[in-house]
Amino acid sequence: MKILIVDDDQSVCLYLKNVLEKWGHQTVICFDGEAAWQVLQTESIHLLLTDWMMPKLSGVELCQRVRSDLESAQYVYVILLTAKDSNDDLVTGFESGADDYISKPVSSKELKVRLKAGQRVLKLERELLEKNNQLKSAHNKIKQNYQRIKNDINAAVKIQQALLPKSTNIELPVNISWDYRPADELAGDLFGFYPLDDVHLALYLIDVSGHGVPAAMLSVYLNKMLCPEKCSEFIYYENSHVNTSSCFRDPAAIIQLLNENFLDDNDEIIYFTMVYAIVNTQTGDGTLCQAGHPYPIVARQNGAMDILGQGGHPVGLIDDAHYSNVNFHLNPGDRFLLYSDGITECCDHNDSLYELQRLQAVLQQSSQQTLKQSLNNIVTSVEQWHGLGVWSDSFADDISLLGVEIKPY
C-alpha cells in the first residue's frame, strides 16, 4: 500500500522508508505537516505515519484536517508517532481522528503489527466502499425505474381522465351530473353516457375489482367497448342473427355478451360489476340490467325513494351467468342515480359502513336542490364520514356517481 511518512527528523523518515519499502510498500516522505497536507490532497494515500510534534502543522492538527476537510472516498488510516505516553495525550490523539499510535523510538516489530491491523481496517473500508457503491448504483437504477413507472402511470392517468365525459350537455331533455374520486392515481371505476338517437339515453357505471394498472387497463378497454360505435360492432359480430339495433337497446344482452367475451380472454382473477341502463327521455320509461353492482336509486321529486335491480352476477366470474332487465319509470323532476360501492361501503374510523340508508337520507334532504348540488352533498357527506383530511388521507376505494334527471316541466 502507499504510505505517507511525515516527520521533521530526516533520519526517522529514512529509517521508516527503508523498512516499509523492504516490506513491499510504496512511500512518500514529507518533513512538515503542511507539505503532507498538500500531498494528501493530490495523491492516493492509504496510510499516514505522522509525528506528533512538527513545525507549521502538528500531527494532531494534520489528523484533524484529514478527518474533517479531506474530500476522498478512500479512507486514510492514521498512525501517530509520539514520545508522549500520558493517558491525556493519547486521548487527545484518538479524539483528533487517529486510528493507532506507536511510541518513539519506533520498533520494526511493533510497526509491522500496527500496519497489519491497519491493512485489515483498510480492507474492510474498501469492501464497505464497494458495497456502498453497489447500493448507490442499485438505488440509482431503482430511482430511474421508479421515475419511468411514474411517468407511465402519469400518462395512464391522463388517458383515464380523457375518457371521462367532457360535458353533460346533450341534445336531450335531461340534466346530467357526475362526480369521481379515485382512491389511487389509477382507478377501476368508469362511467359514461351518450344519446342513442333523438330520444334514448344510454348510461352505465362500472367498478373493476382491485386498483392500479390492471384495473385501469380493463376500465379503458371497457370504456371503448361500450362506446356506441364499438358496442354496435361488438354485438353484430358475436350475434349476427340478432337485430343489432334492438339488441343495442337491450341492457341485458349487452352485459351477457360482455360476460361471454370477457371470460374467453380472462386469464387473471379480475372481474367487474356494472349497471347499464337505457332511458326514453320523452316518456320517462327506462330499462336497466344490474350485474353485481350496488342497487340504482330513483329519487322522486316528492322525496320518495325507489331501489331498483335484482342483484345479478359480476361480469367475468360465471360462465353461464344469466342477466335480466328491470323496467322503471321517471317522471319529470325524478332523478336516476348510479354509484359505486366505494360510497355505501366507505368506513369511518370505527370501521362502520356508510350504507345505503345514509345515501338515501342525503338524497331526500337535497331533493329541492339542483342535481349537481345533490351529488356534491353526497360526496361531502361521505368525506365527513370517512374523516378525509382528519384521520384519513384518501378513500379506501374509488368513488363515482352518475345522476340523470328528467327535466321538470
Image: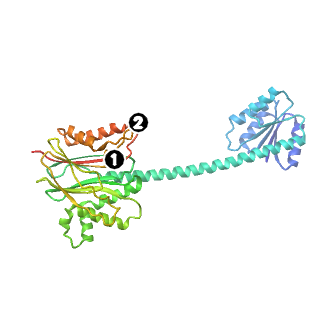
- Residue 93, above or below 207: above
Which quadrant holds residue 235?
bottom left
Q: Is residue 316 left or right of residue 302?
A: right
Circle 1 residue? 342
> Relative to residue 57, is residue 294 depicted above or below?
below
Q: Is residue 161 visible?
A: yes
Q: Earlier in the sequence, mark 1 or mark 2?
A: 1
Does 339 sit left or right of 173 as displayed? right
Which percent across, then down, holds residue 320?
Answer: 31, 66
**Quarter of the image with the C terminus in it:** top left
Is 189 or 289 nearer to us in this picture?
A: 289
The answer to which of 158 and 364 lies nearer the viewer is 364
Image point (30%, 48%), residue name: 400
The percent position of residue 361, horizontal first and vertical second, equals 24, 39
How crowded pointer 1 is (Cα within 10 Å; few <14, some 14-19, many 20+) is rated as: many
Residue 198: x and y, percent? 14, 57
Q: Name the foreground residue: 373 vs 114.
A: 373
Residue linked to disc 2? 391
Colour scheme employed for the rendering of this structure: rainbow
Kind of residue sitting beneath label 2: Trp
Identify which amino acid the numbered label 1 is placed on.
Answer: Gly
> At 33% from the left edge and 39% from the top edge, which residue is drawn?
383
Answer yes or no: is residue 57 visible.
no
Q: Is residue 284 left or right of residue 343?
A: left
Residue at position x 65%, y 49% in the image: 131
* Mark 1 residue element: helix
- 231 or 5, nearer to the observer: 231
Residue appearing at x 78%, y 46% in the figure: 119
